[in-house]
Amino acid sequence: MLLSVIVPCYNEEGNIALFYSETVKALGGLMNDTELIFINDGSADRTLEELHKIYDSSPYHIQVVSFSRNFGKEAGLKAGLDHAKGEFTVIIDADLQQRPEYILDMMKILREHPEYDGVACYQEKRKENFLMTFLKGSFYKVIDSMTDVKIMQSASDFRLMRRSVVEAILSLPERCRFSKGIFAWVGFNWFYMPYEVEDRAAGTSKWNFWKLMGYALDGIIAFSNKPLIISSVLGVVIFMLSIVYMVVIIVKTLIWGDPVAGFPTLCCLLLMLSGIQLLCFGIMGQYMAKNYTETKGRPMYVVKEKLEK
Ligand code: UDP
Ligand code: MG
């Protein structure tokens, strides 16, 4: 098999048929040596029926892997990579925001340049509103300053990889997966190709502000210990400041015989310190929670049904 196309699908009933026909059209003769791997991530709509229709009528190699419930896109990507057999593997969304025509360009680059191991598409200009662009930009700055791996700004999951990259990614056993970090962590020589993101063909994005914030937090925790270091440093700094303050109080009392220290000062200090303590506990808790998830060793996804031809 030359090419594996991984397509994570969650409630994409309106897009599947169009995605399939557009992909077949774009890949042309390449389709004979290509497998389409659809991961149905516990869709609650008619996505699975649409996938069955394609599976029954298509003359090409198709896999439909259906999860027992929604496990999230990261699990979908992992399942796709687990099932991919191609010499090249590409990950693409089902909503046609990423045009399948780009796959040909990516293939061309890898075939003509053996020095590259993968091609990752990135958005030159984001079509999102100012706040989103700002938040995403800030996230990359934060994660960049906190981790040793270099995560390329705006690079998407829309990427084509050689077999060696896929095997390297699969060799990471972690359950709390943050693909952007994993792609960077495994290294290799990536070619970054600019692309234009289209509007969704149908349906709505599965992301909202809070989900994105959670995802950003997961990424930082998965790839950096700096928050723990920062909380320890904060503890040491506050301890030193408190010693200085103690000396100030003692000296003041000895010289001026200051009676009772002010209640407001006490109140502020108490609130500030307990706030910082809770924050540090929270940070530690986040790492412990991830550790707990990893040690439980649950599978990343449960397959309910699998079709392959
Ligand atoms: N997706 C998935 N599981 C999820 C959420 C999304 O498999 O829990 C798929 C979705 O069907 C789509 C891709 O991941 O093919 C990207 O999702 P979406 O379009 O919602 O993200 P956006 O393009 O807005 O970043
Ligand atoms: Mg999308």
Image (cartoon, rainbow, N blue to C red):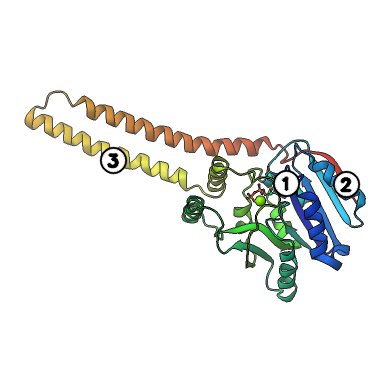
Q: Quadrant of residue 32?
A: bottom right
Say which residue label 2 marks. 53
Say which residue label 3 marks. 240
Residue 76: which numbered mark, if any? 1
> What distance separates the C-alpha of mark 1 from that of mark 3?
49 Å
Secondary structure of residue under mark 2: helix
x%, y% of residue 257? 9, 27
> What distance separates the C-alpha of mark 3 from that of mark 2?
68 Å
Marks 3 and 2, the one that precedes in the sequence: 2
Tell me which amino acid carries mark 2.
Lys
Marks 1 and 3, the one that precedes in the sequence: 1
Look at the numbered disc 1 and say if its residue's Cβ is closer than 8 Å to ligand 1: yes
Quarter occupied by the N terminus: bottom right
x%, y% of residue 300? 71, 41
Q: Are marks 3 and 2 in contact (CB under 8 Å)?
A: no
* Crowding at mark 3 (Cα within 10 Å: few <14, some 14-19, many 20+): few
Tell me which amino acid carries mark 3.
Met
Secondary structure of residue under mark 1: helix
* Crowding at mark 1 (Cα within 10 Å: few <14, some 14-19, many 20+): many
Identify the residue at horizontal 57%, vertical 35% (top origin).
289
* Crowding at mark 2 (Cα within 10 Å: few <14, some 14-19, many 20+): few
Is residue 83 in view? Answer: no
Identify the residue at horizontal 54%, vertical 46% (top origin).
216
Closer to viewer: mark 1 or mark 3: 1
x%, y% of residue 274? 36, 30
Residue extending furthest left?
A: 256
Tell me which amino acid carries mark 1.
Gly
> What distance separates the C-alpha of mark 2 from that of mark 1?
21 Å
Residue 107 located left or right of residue 211: right
Q: Are marks 2 and 1 in contact (CB under 8 Å)?
A: no
Look at the numbered disc 3 and say if its residue's Cβ is closer than 8 Å to ligand 1: no
Residue 270 located left or right of residue 6: left
